[in-house]
Image (cartoon, grey):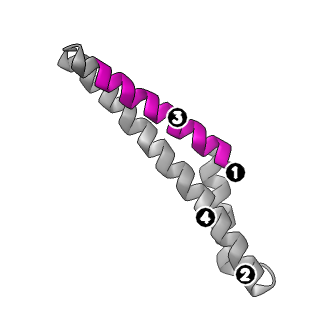
Amino acid sequence: MASLKDVEQVADDLSALVDQLRGEIKNNASFDKLVKLADEISEHADEAAGTFSTVNEALMSRLDELKGGGSSSRSGRTSSSARAKSRS
């Protein structure tokens, strides 16, 4: 499962790419270079969304278990889904 440290790393990577994009814009970079950076930003944003979703599912599953006093069929499916996403 992804940790908050993983989330922080994804955010740092995304921030660095945005800074690089800004620098390229100021230096009149070619549109080809800007497109490549924008694609990288998009990929990192998708990764961040996936990481946030995995962490959220794991936390919600744990809360459901605590509320129900044990595993329910719903939380079992969520846990399996969270594990599957963290592997991909």
Q: Circle 3 sits in a helix, a strand or a loop, which is it?
A: helix
- Report whether 36 appears left or right of 2: left
Distance between mark 3 and mark 2 Cα atoms:
36 Å
Q: Earlier in the sequence, mark 3 or mark 1?
A: 1
What kind of residue is marked 2?
Ser
| Magenta-highlighted residues | 4-23
Distance between mark 2 and mark 4 Cα atoms:
14 Å
Residue under label 1, please give it.
1
Residue under label 2, please give it.
72
Residue 57, labelled with which disc?
Answer: 4
- Foreground mark, 2 or 4, reads 4
Distance between mark 1 and mark 4 Cα atoms:
10 Å
- Report whether 19 appears left or right of 13: left
User: Splitting the image into 4 quarters, where does residue 36 fall?
Assistant: top left
Q: Earlier in the sequence, mark 1 or mark 2?
A: 1
What kind of residue is marked 3?
Asp
Residue under label 3, please give it.
12
Residue drawn at the location 64% of the way across and 54% of the way down: 84
